[in-house]
Image: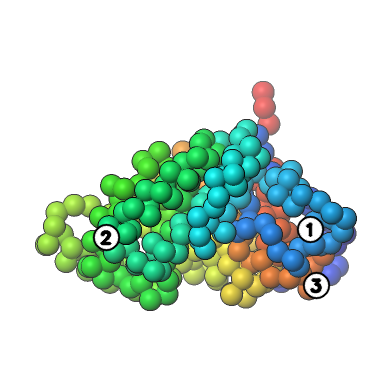
Amino acid sequence: MQAQGKGESASDADTLPDSGLVPLDLVDEVFIGTSGFKYNSWKSTFYPEYDVNEHAYYAKHFGALELNNTFYGPPKPYVINSWFNRWAARRGALVVKAERLFTHGKALNIDGEFRQAWEARKALYLGLGPCLGAILWQFSGGFRATCENLRRITDLLPLLPPHVDHAFEMRHDSWFDEDARQDLLKKKKRRTEGPDPLAERGAVLRAFEHCPHANLVQGKRFRYVRFHGSKGKYKGLYGKKDMQDWATTIRKWAEAGQKVYAFFNNTDPPYEETLPSAVLDAFYLAEALRDMQKPTA
């Protein structure tokens, strides 16, 4: 099979990789997967044409998964059990996307309803045991960088399980303006002493100028990258060259002692590619990391 990436001609395209598994020396540090796994357009492109358990098939090809359906409502306990059984051998492989009730409906206004719902969801999420690596908090485009919202994040932190990574994905432009963010932190410190709540416990989100539509969450102990498509809005293949560049960066982070999560959200239907963009880019990234694996003595 041949695939054509961004900036590649058909004659330059290489044989497709077929695995999103990272090399053994990075298996506890780097987690690569896609944002969700169940898409109709992936049938007969990534998944075989015959009936197949898509979750099981996905888990054979990837070492991690970002669970998007948790954003829309609480999963049933038996679903949590099935996820645990599927991923039990892979510590930290699953990322749960926090329910929109908290990030969109309540916008982190921690009232009694919020606390009660969060305690119930937290118990569900923790049912994943050691499979649970991180919780992704994705905020609406209207959640701005204000003193009030920083206070809400600060109030949330004591409610979070400390052994789980927490990635805060902000989508309003005000969070990307570093000067404005520093001014905001100064105002916050005048009101209440304490460190930057995002940098201290969760993450500081930055946009990559050299890689459009990819967001980095940078925490003290981890990095979390979400690839939203080279064309934006979940569309567009990044291609082999971009993923080779990313592999160099990701290996440096891992060798510096940080866990790295990399998930591909460019889940649009395949057009020119013979695989969905998210799957192919994840395969390219994992392949580049495998090619860089240090030989064992």
In the image, farthest residue toward the left: 190
Sequence-earlier tag: 3 or 2: 2
Q: Gap in Å between the C-alphas at discs 2 and 1?
A: 43 Å
Residue annotated with mark 1: 46
Q: Residues within 10 Å of mark 2 (few under 14, many from 20)?
A: few
What secondary structure is found at the residue carrying circle 3? Answer: loop
Sequence-earlier tag: 1 or 3: 1
Residue annotated with mark 2: 111
Sequence-earlier tag: 2 or 1: 1
Please say whether residue 199 is visible from this viewpoint.
no
Above/below status of 231 relative to 296? below
* Numbered badge on residue 272: 3
Report the amino acid beneath label 3. Answer: Glu
Q: Gap in Å between the C-alphas at discs 3 and 2?
A: 49 Å
Q: Nearer the viewer, residue 286 or 39?
A: 39
Above/below status of 40 relative to 37? below
What secondary structure is found at the residue carrying circle 2? Answer: loop
